[in-house]
Amino acid sequence: MDKFWAHLIKVQPDPDPWVVVVSALVALVIVGFRMSWQLSRGLITIAHEGGHALMALVTRRKLEGIRLHSDTSGVTLTRGRPTGPGMVLTAMAGYLAPPLLGLAAAWLTEQGHITLLIWTVLLFLVCMLLLIRNLYGALILLATGGAVFALIMYAPAEIQQGVALVAVWFLLLGGIRPIIELQQKRRRRQARDSDADQLARLTFLPGGFYVFFFFMVSVAAAVFGGYLMNPL
């Protein structure tokens, strides 16, 4: 156990500046192009629903399960008071989770804790798998968790570092696009039950305020995370 803990908190050397730049460009391409985004968007959904689930537990709502769907949507089922701070915070946590997780991951990366970051991601996926209530969601989490486990067990340190950097940038940049898509759907009246509109029904503030709030937090997280990841 002592050896494992020492391995877990081991500090890796700083990546070469070109590795940081290339990883950012790779993540930008993945998020920016329609086909690659559709293939990878489900990873953002995992973080999104994980944020709902974590906040539900923190606010002592009863967490009944998570569902991930093939269209990259998802739903987190909770039980408790239909109004109040716990419900508001749980609804608010989804769109904030990916950029804030990206910011936390950027901080771990800046500290050189790549190994700790990857193991934390694996633990997060295992915890979500225990809460999944549909077959497709279980398969996606098993595939993602299996890939992370293979990375830990078989990839050299340089590959682990490169993949971790791409993942951090992906969370930071990929946390912004769903919010833009949300507002586009709201303009076409196609998202009446979105998190923002649920929050509008729970509070005295309009849904557009929450979309703006989500957007500002995600941009701030991306900027500060990029600052932490700055290779210069």
Image (cartoon, grey):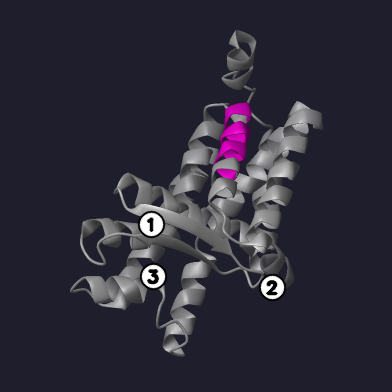
On the rendered structure, is 38 left or right of 133?
right
Q: What residue type is labelled 2?
A: Arg
* Nearest the eye: 2 or 225: 2
* Badge number at residue 82: none
231 or 184, nearer to the observer: 184
Q: How far is mark 2 from mark 3, CA to CA? A: 23 Å
Q: At 73% across and 71% down in the image, what residue appears?
A: 35
User: Who's the residue at 63% across and 35% down the image?
Assistant: 118
Q: How many labels does the image show?
A: 3
Nearer the observer, 222 or 9 = 9
Mark 3 in CB contact with mark 1 (< 8 angstroms): no
- Give the residue furthest to the left: 204
Q: Is residue 186 left or right of residue 166?
A: left
| Residue that badge 3 annotates | 195
Q: Which of the marked residues, 1 or 2, is nearer the chain's N terminus?
A: 2
Q: Earlier in the sequence, mark 3 or mark 1?
A: 1
Q: State the CA–CA distance, disc 1 to disc 2.
A: 26 Å
Residue occupied by mark 1:
93
Can the viewer see residue 28? yes
Q: Where is residue 37 in the image (x, y as percent from the top left)?
A: 67, 66
Residue stretch in magenta: 115-125
Task: Find the distance from the CA under tag 3 to the CA under tag 1.
Answer: 9 Å
